[in-house]
Amino acid sequence: MKNPILPATIGGLLELLQTGDGAALESLDAPTASHADLATAAISVAGELRARGVARGDRVAIVSPNSASMVSAFLGAATAATCAPLNPAYGRSEFDFFLGDLKPKLLLVDAALDTPARNAAQARNIAVAEVGRAQNAVSGFVTVDGTVANGTQLPPCSPDDVALVLHTSGTTSRPKIVPLSHRNLMTSAHNIGATLSLSAADRSLTIMPLFHIHGLVAALLAPLAAGGTIIVPPGFLASEFAGWLARFRPTWYSAVPTMHQAIVQRLSTADGRALRAKAPLRFVRSSSAALAPATIRDIEAVVGVPVIEAYGMTEAAHQMTSNPLPPAIRKPGTVGIAAGPEVAIMSSGGAILPIGELGEVVIRGLNVAAGYLDNPEASNAAFTAGWFRTGDQGVLDADRYLTLTGRLKELINRAGEKIAPLEVDGVLADHPAVAQAICFGISHPILGEDVAAAVVLKPGMTVTPRGLREFVAARLAYFKVPRQIRIVDRIPVGATGKLQRRGLAEQLDIQAEVPVISGDTTAPSSPLEEIVSAAWSDLLGRDIPGVHENFFALGGDSMLAARIVSRLRESLRVELPLLAFFDTPTVAGIASELGVLLGAEGEHG
């Protein structure tokens, strides 16, 4: 395929593909398609849409799993109109919401898919057509009456036309619609290709869903723009992944951390290692969620190639920063350097901060959306002096590598102390028994918020919540240590495989433990409890009824608490934060916190 000038539109990409005869697309459900074959299929879709009266500014929703026909439907719809891919796993109410919000002129549904999207569209008088591979064709467009599209004219499109609309995740309120132009998408695709040195020799295993910006740009547009091949299995199936490596022999793939962790488990077996050896991988890429350094080490040990961690979001048409390929320096724990747009750190007041200072990550560049669709208030709030405010907190080091510390709206405010969940995630993930970890805030009537976490253990490994708290306490400040850690079989993930922090406390039924006075008469049962009880009795001037009585209900105050902290420091040589008295103001609770800080199971001689 000729590649004289990088195209600025998807239509331009299709014109470029028409000149090629190399393999463009391989899948389980269709013969191998050349670049020209794929372009012909996409142009056929575009022509059929125009024949149905779909114009440049209209929206076309698509509901389809990953497949060859999904690829051509996306390319064709984005060229002829504005494409709006939706998660095929949605239920009726979700389809009703998204179709009502998007107001598409047409809904394309995979012909073999049993989905409530059809009924949701029909209830809103939205026309429905089916997309699927026509008989003896690489990837064709099939109408509801079974006739095959045969459009041959490529509709005109300009770089500023909106090619794709996607909803944000809606973590704070109603999800917003992000309109991405051809220029946004193709700029990002070219940035990714340059970052990864993609060429016609590269073969991308596309396991990210094609209703998500990560899959559409990094795993589809970027390799095609570089003249390479995309391999499209029906989504991500961990049990089949090793076989796909051996069968399709990809040179790279991009995934989210939960996928990488599942892949590591599959490739760690003897059969998995044998199948992995057949794939000429040169790197693997990770994005869309933070990847702990311990996980990077695990992946590289099993897969045997470098992990390239990147940072992206929908509003940036995916990629913003990336660690570079070797031999350039990769810094685990960072998301790399600017990889396309300009990247800076901004204060809450809108000033660009110097290197080393913590603030909000901001970006600007040709890949960045101009705002949100029909939402001027959100659009105005998202930009300051031309910079898009990502909502992520981070810091740039002297080499301009970016370290993310969390979503500003996800920071846990524990009695005035701000805690970044990502930092706690990383420490927990570094424990040798932990496979996955996620930290989150829980409501607390005294502290405002408290810290909790959920972890999944590696197969055959054991550790107690107490042991994990001690592990974190040895590495982070006291107030960052999760007061509750729940060991679970799995952590809920979203449609794209991201761990879901929001709402996790409710799903796991984790509530703050707030001790209250109860007439308890339980005697101390450990040396630490005896030491704490004696200090309380002395300074309160009264006997302590039981180890579960509330310090403040017994007449204690912050000044007495400070004196007890001083006494315990002298007798035990440990710095117990004053915050502990607001966290667990009982003899048993303080003794437990002392045990964590001392690294002993409640024992001290």
Image (cartoon, rainbow, N blue to C red):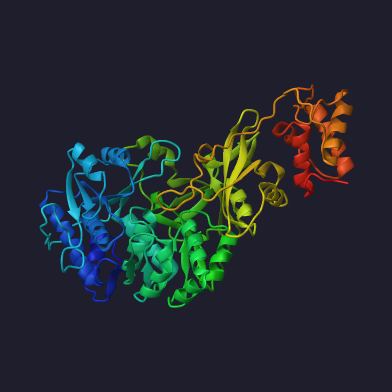
> Looking at the rendering, which quadrant does residue 575 occupy?
top right
> From where the camera sits, is residue 171 visible?
yes
Closer to the camera, 42 or 481? 481
Q: Position of residue 381 (x, y in %)?
A: 43, 38
Q: Quadrant of the N terminus?
A: bottom left
The answer to whether any part of residue 338 appears in the image is no
Q: Is residue 470 left or right of residue 267?
A: right
Q: Give the image location of residue 436, x and y in percent.
A: 56, 54
Q: Nearer the viewer, residue 103 or 466?
A: 466
Q: From what the image shows, is residue 454 above or below residue 529?
A: below
Instruction: Give x and y (percent) for residue 124.
Output: 20, 37
Question: Relative to the observer, which residue lies in front, 82 or 101?
Answer: 101
Is 358 in front, or is 454?
454
Q: Position of residue 585 (x, y in %)?
A: 74, 31
Q: How many marks?
A: 0
Among the 4 quarters of the image, the one containing residue 239: bottom left
Instruction: Check the image and report above or below for 562 versus 105.
Output: above
* Residue at x 56%, y 68% (from the top left corner): 329
User: Height in image: 8 above or below 211?
Assistant: below
